[in-house]
Image: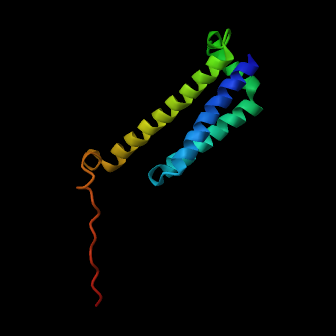
Amino acid sequence: MIDIVKIFITHVGITLFIGGIICCFVAVTFRYGVFCTLLGNLLFCLAIIFPKQAVEFIETYQLTELFNVVDIEMLKVKAVVTGIIIMGALWVLRWIKHVITEGIVAFIFPSLYQPQIKEVKDK
C-alpha cells in the first residue's frame, strides 16, 4: 500500500513540476509556473518523507479501495491525469481571482481597462 501511494504522489508531483517548468518559459504564466513547480516539489517531499502519514490519511477518509488492487502502469496514467486536472483547476482559480480583483468589465473588455496617465507640470 505504501509503495502504491508513493508512486501515485510522485507521478502527480512530476506532472505538476514539468507543467510548471513549461509554464515558466511563457512570460504571462511565469508566476503560475513557479507555483506549480513548488507544488510539485512539495508532493515529491510528501512522497519521500511522509509515506506512512499519507497512507494513514487515505485510510482515515476510507479511500483504500481506490488503491487496493491496482495495475501499476494504469496507476501512473491516473496520476498524470490527476496532475493535469490539478493544474487545470488552479488555472481556473487564477482566472476567477482576476475576475474578482479586476472586475467583470475589465475581464470581458481588456482594451477598455487602461490606466489613466496624468501629466505633471513643473512649476
Give the colouring mode of the picture: rainbow
Q: Quadrant of the N terminus?
A: top right
Residue 114 position (above or below residue 21): below
Quadrant location of the C terminus in the rendered image: bottom left
Along the line of sight, which residue is nearer the eye, 78 or 32? 78
Determine the residue positioned at 75% across, 21% down. Answer: 3
Give the number of marks.
0
Residue 19 x/y as whole percent: 55, 40
In the depicted view, which residue is nearer to us: 29 or 49?
A: 29
Image position of 3 (left or right of 33): right
> 123 or 19, which is in the foreground?
19
Residue at (52% x, 31% y) in the render: 84
Q: Compared to 88, does 108 lie above or below?
A: below
**Image location (x, y in percent) of residue 53:** 73, 25
- The residue lying at 54 percent from left, 26 percent from top is 81
Pick out the residue farthest to the front: 73
Residue at 65% over, 29% down: 11
The picture quadrant where one finds residue 15 is: top right
Q: Position of residue 120 (x, y in %)?
A: 29, 80
Say if 62 sits above or below 102 in the image: above
Task: State the image coordinates of residue 22 (x, y, percent, origin top left).
Answer: 54, 45
